[in-house]
Image (cartoon, rainbow, N blue to C red):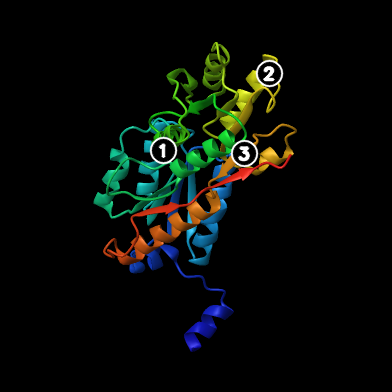
Amino acid sequence: MQVQKLAAEMNYEPNLTAVSFKQGKTMTLGVILPNLGEEFFSIAINGIEDVATKNKYTVLIGQSHDDVEREKQIVDTMRRHRVDGIIVSLAKTTKDYGHFQQLKNYNIPVVFFDRIPDLADAYSVMCNLENSSVELVDWLVNKGHKQIGFIKGPDTIVQSAHRLQGYQQALKKHKIKPEASYIVTTDLTRKKTQDAMHKLLALKIRPTAVIAFNDYVALDAMQYARLQGIHINKDISFVSYANLPLTNYLDEPPVASVEQFPYQQAEKATSVLLQLINSRNNDPDIPQKTILESKVVVNKK
């Protein structure tokens, strides 16, 4: 007690490096995201920081800007800073996951969320986008649509396939013949999205509804269609994924969007990572794959 009292009187602060050495931890989590300019990921950061702060962890954030080489550089920097664990949403150009798998050699656990790798042994948190794609098609068909276009994301993003599978499954359920020409691809840039929308508009029988990879893709596609004289959500209805709050301020938002719960995904990913850190990766009861149910939200405008 005398030592503690004296320490308080002298405003003594413990040497964090020494404390970290003793505990075998730095009490720092690394977070790698594609782009904090996207509302989805800025919301996710709130979930990560809230859980980290409650557990007395500091968060070190890096943005890959959807560049795999930059992602690798950030991973190496975080490794050298001896973070206790890393939370990741992959860059769209990431095809090989070796830079994350190497972290096992340094006992640095990794948890992926939203954009996850195609690895059987990876810890991940994601939404069930296949089911939500089925729901989107169901909703559109109930509104009278049978010609439904689909703007797919890059093949390197695992969830691109999940979205497409749900779309195709739903068409089959409603006995609608799938048209290969109705499926176009974007790399998520405005230019490629415009090119994709151009292909749909050039069809002899163009779609009356379009499902876009996310709200940002939908907005770029809608802008292009508008410039071609299309009346948005009248000539062609647009639906998408992410349900970003910013769309509430638009006069013509997507008529429906899939809520992917970025805060909850990131919150769960952080909790799983802390379990891995505290158990030294030795607890078999820690969930490896967590799948949250997403939800189709219809815009009331």
Q: Is residue 276 visible?
A: yes
Q: Splitting the image into 4 quarters, where does residue 84 fall? A: bottom left
Mark 3 residue type: Ala
Q: Is residue 49 above or below residue 240?
A: below
Mark 1 residue type: His
Q: Out of 205 and 247, give the one closest to the viewer.
A: 205
69 horizontally vs 41: left or right: left
**Total numbered labels:** 3
Secondary structure found at label 3: strand
Image location (x, y in percent) of residue 245: 66, 44
Quarter containing the C terminus: top right
Per the model, the C-alpha gap separating discs 3 and 1 is 18 Å
The residue pinned by badge 3 equals 256
The residue pinned by badge 1 equals 162
Q: Pointer 2: residues within 10 angstroms few (<14), some, or many (20+)?
A: some
Per the model, the C-alpha gap separating discs 2 and 3 is 18 Å
Image location (x, y in percent) of residue 219: 63, 29
Q: Splitting the image into 4 quarters, where does residue 15 fall? A: bottom left
112 horizontally vs 264: left or right: left
The residue pinned by badge 2 equals 230
Q: Pointer 1: residues within 10 angstroms few (<14), some, or many (20+)?
A: some
Per the model, the C-alpha gap separating discs 2 and 1 is 29 Å
Residue placed at 27% from the left, 44% from the top? 102
Q: Is residue 83 visible?
A: no
Counting residues from the start of the chain, the first of labels 3 and 1 encountered is 1
Mark 2 residue type: Ile
Residue placed at 40% from the left, 30% from the top? 93
Q: Are marks 3 and 1 in contact (CB under 8 Å)?
A: no
Secondary structure found at label 2: loop
Counting residues from the start of the chain, the first of labels 2 and 1 encountered is 1
Counting residues from the start of the chain, the first of labels 2 and 3 encountered is 2
